[in-house]
Structure formats: structure tokens, C-alpha cells
Image (tube, coloured by chain):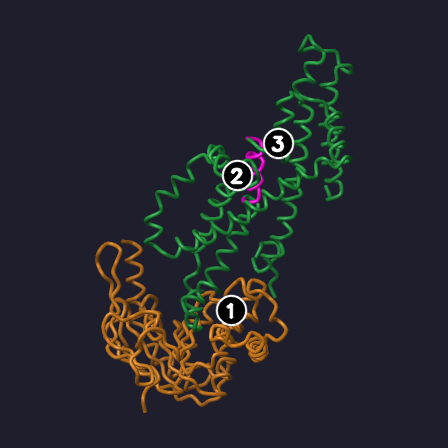
Chain colours: A green, B orange
Amino acid sequence: MNRRHLRIYQALLLFAIFAFWQLATDPELIPPFVWDNPNRAAFFFGEPLKMFQAIWVWFSSGTIYPHLWVTLQETALAFVIGSALGLVIGLWLGLSPTASALFDPYITAMNAMPRVVLAPIFMVWFGLGIWSKVALGVTLVFFIVFFNVYQGVKEVSPVVLNNATMLGASRKQLLRYVYLPSATSWVFSSLHTSVGMAFVGAVVGEYLGSAKGVGYLIHMAEGAFDINTVFAGILVLTAFALVLDLVVTRVEKRLLVWRPTQSETEQL
Amino acid sequence: MTAAVHFDRITCTFAGKGGGSYTAVKEVTLAIGDGEFVSIVGPTGCGKSTLLNVAAGLLKPSTGTLSVFGETLAGINKHAGYMFQSEALMPWRSCLDNVAAGLEFRGEALTRARAKGEEWLSRVGLAGFGDRYPHQLSGGMRKRTSLAQMLILDPKILLMDEPFSALDIQTRQLMENELLELWNADRKSVLFITHDLEEAISVSDRVVVLSAGPASHPIGEYAIDLPRPRDVAEIRHTRRFIELHDQIWHAMKDEVLKGYLQTKNRVVA
């Protein structure tokens, strides 16, 4: 199967799923055989056509944009702050055995804690605006980046370090020219996961209490038992996550050109 | 004349994992003259690299002193360039930036460092490859980059730890010839480590044979009176080369066997 055919089949599969969904939930197309009330299926599972209608209304009237923008802002801020903190603290603990021995059990404990339960606390601390969502996202992103950087620092090749030392690098220069680039590469290798986590933090935060954002839209629709809008929100979020992932892949490719990948390595 | 590098009764003992200790080299006294090309050969695991790390200042000897141009070494040996056996290039830096790194560390302006880097790249036959990353280069090209990276700082002493052992024989002879050519241009002191006796004889002024470890020490020194400039591929077939090879190999053979048995027993035990 070549690439173009694959894409066509993928699109067809998507279409088939939605078509089946529509058929199975439409009260007039299929005689009810599970529930006695013909509208029951649509009540529980929604109707794709109505979902797309809701999405269409959102985008054509432009009401969705401020919500998407808020979610995007929260995701970006959570990612940047979480990564920066993870990078700095990962470098610090990676380079200082005493500090890492001291903090080790606390880091493990904090990572083991389900961080979603912190959301209400963040709401009390930072209010219902974007910052409580950013804080939740940061706690999720931080640990991914932190562990990657920590491991990355420990695994810097001793030969590369010795070589840089022999070339005259001071301790400060080793940090800047060897440890930092090495650690940064580990941040980028966890980019997909950490951006995803920032997104999860933003949406979950919005869902638990906010006045804006796609998570908020879903929460409101759920309160009104409007299952079609809930699904519409989920579809928008999914598409949004896909776009985000695409952007990350682009950025990654640009930043990690130096990294050998099996298929790309060209020997001269 | 003061020696470029002088090992004075150097002993290196490492703490073992099981509480015991392991003496890699014992009471090594050795001098490398200014502008002299000295090779150290010996069986595997005899502490050749340990000696080199001591000369570089990366490793502090347990006892004994190391002096560089008559001064006792404390910390990193700033007169020395080091070429490692395994990959030592920074993978996130392009070939050119790797070569220019030493100058950058020394605080030279980036444009000047890069210009000098280009110059050195063409001198080792890598002109036009400056924007490649190490993984895009072949093993031989990476070694050339390492060579340029070391020589750009114009060190007075070159420390080389089996630098070409990972290369195939043709590339290796090519690199050896290039090294000799570069060395001939301005004679630096070289301490060259190898397990390959032929390589040692074809490049050096003097070959030092180390005994098998633990507690290895020099057991013989041989002046190599082959005329320079040399072609390493051709010189192997001259009569004098074969004589020297026989002579040194004869002295080395027992040690190599000893070293082999020890490693074997260690694996079995």
C-alpha cells in the first residue's frame, strides 16, 4: 500500500465510523431494538451530524476562538514554565550528588502523587483564571522533563567531558557547552509527552472550574445533558491536540538535526 | 634539556569494588623529550591509558610526580592535547564548531575561531564538511575532526590513546601518514599509545614496552632509527623494520601471553 492509498483508506475508515455512529443513533433510520424509547441511543451517544453542526456554529460564529486561545495559552505557559523548571532542577540535582541524595525520596513521592487532586488547591491559590490551570500543567510537565534531564546529565559521555576539559573548558563552560546541550536534547526527546501533559493539565483544570476554555465548554454542555456539544468539544480538542503534535514534530526535526536516526544517517 | 613529560616513579592504585585495591601501574619512570615521538606498547589491560590520563592531568597518581617541562603538574595539563580512543566529539556541534570549540573555550571571538577552524579542517582534508554533524561523518572523518580539534590549540605535547584503533587498516595507514606529516611540520612531543607493535615502530622515535598488569612498568626501551620522513605502509617491508619488530616482539611475547592468561583467568573466575 503506498502512502496516498493509505491516506485514502484512513479517511474512508473515519467516514465509516461516523456513518455507523449516525445510523446507530438516528431514531428514524434503524428500528429501536435495544431501548424502547427511540431517542435513548441519541441521548447517550449523541448524533454525529448534530455534533458537526455544533462545531460548525462554533467556528462560523467565531465563539470558539476565545476558548481555544485560552486553552492554547495555558498549554504553552504550562509547557514553558514546567520545562524550564525541570531543566534547571534536573541539571542541579544531576550535577550535585548531595542535593540529589537529599531530595530523592521527596521527588519520588511527589511524582507518585496523583497530581489532579491538586487542582482544587491551585484554584484556591491562583483563582479561576488561567494560572490555576497553568499550575496544574506545570506539575505534570515538570516531572517528565526533570527525570529526562536528570538521567541525561548522568549519562553525558565521560569521554566527551574529558575531551572538553582537555580543550580547556572551565567548569562553567562544561555546564554551558556540554551539560546544557546534552540535557536540552533530552528535553526535546520528551517533547511529545510533555506538550501532551501540558494540554491535559489545561483541559482538566478548565473542566474542574473555570470561565473560559474548551474544557469549560464541555463542562457546561455536560451540565445541560447536551451530549452532542460534549462530543463536539471532545472532537475539537482531539483535532487541536493533533495540530499541536504536528507542530512539535516540526520543531523537533529542526532542533535535533544533529541526532542520528537509523534511517537518516548518511555515511560518507 | 628538560623533558617535555617526565614520569617520576608514578604509581596508580585504584580502590576495587570488593574493598580490595588494584595497582594499575607501579613505579613508572619515563621521560619524553622535547619534540620526541614516543610510543608505549603493551598487552591489553596493562595500564597504558592510565599513564596517559596521568600525563593529561585527568588522573592524579597515588604516588610519584609528573612534571611537564620541568614543572610539577597540578590539575589539567595545559600544554597537552589529548586524542581519545573512543568518540569524543560533541554530537550536538557541527564538525566546524567541534574544531573551533577549544578556541571558543579560550575566549576567542566566534568568527575568528570559526575562520581558524575552517583552515584546520582543510588541513586535515575535510574542507567543505564543516557543517556536517559527527554522526554524518565516517569513522575516519571523525578522527580527522578530533585531530584538527586537538591541533588547533597548538599544544606542545600530544597525548594519543590508540587513536586509530577503530579504523580499518587502509584508513589507519592514511591517518598515520597524515599524522606524521603534520608532526614533521613542527615537532611536538608525542606520547602515543597503541597495542599494535607495527604501528608503534612505524611512527615513533622510541618504543617503550610495558609489562602485563597489574603493577605494570616499562620492561624495555627501543630506539627506532628508521629514517624520516616515513611512509608507514612501505616502511613495514624494510629490513631494519623487520629486525626491530623481531627484537621488540621477542621481549613482548611473554608479557602478552601473561596478560592474556590473566584476562582469561579473570573472566573464568
- Residue identified by numbered label 2: A132
Q: Position of residue A213 (x, y in %)?
A: 63, 36
> What type is the residue that disc 3 sits on?
Tyr
- The disc, 3 or 2, on the residue closer to the chain's N-terminal end is 2
Q: Measured along the vertical axis of the image, is residue A119 above or below residue B118?
A: above
Q: Nearer the viewer, mark 3 or mark 1?
A: 3
What residue is disc 3 on?
A216
Q: Label 2 is found on which chain of the structure? A: A
Q: Where A19 sits versus B125, above or below? A: above
Q: What is the chain identity of the residue bearing mark 3? A: A
The reply to whether label 3 and label 2 mark residues of one chain is: yes
Image vertical order of residue B32 relative to residue A60, above or below: below
Residue B75 as seen in the image, left or right of residue A241: left
Q: CA distance from mark 1 to mark 2?
A: 60 Å
- Circle 2 sits in a helix, a strand or a loop, which is it? helix
Quadrant of the image occupied by residue A38? top right
Please, what is the three-letter code of the amino acid marked with disc 1?
Asp
Residue B173 showing in the rendered view: no
Q: Nearer the viewer, residue B53 or A249?
A: A249
Q: Which residues are magenta?
A: A194-208
Where disc 1 sits, the SS reads loop
In the rendered structure, the residue with mark 1 lies on which chain? B
The 10 Å Cα crowd at callout 3, few under 14, some 14 to 19, many 20 or more, is: many
In the rendered image, residues at marks 3 and 1 fall on the same chain: no
Cα separation, mark 3 vs mark 1, equals: 64 Å
Q: Which mark is residue B168?
A: 1
- Secondary structure predominantly adopted by residues drawn in magenta: helix
Q: Secondary structure at mark 3?
A: helix
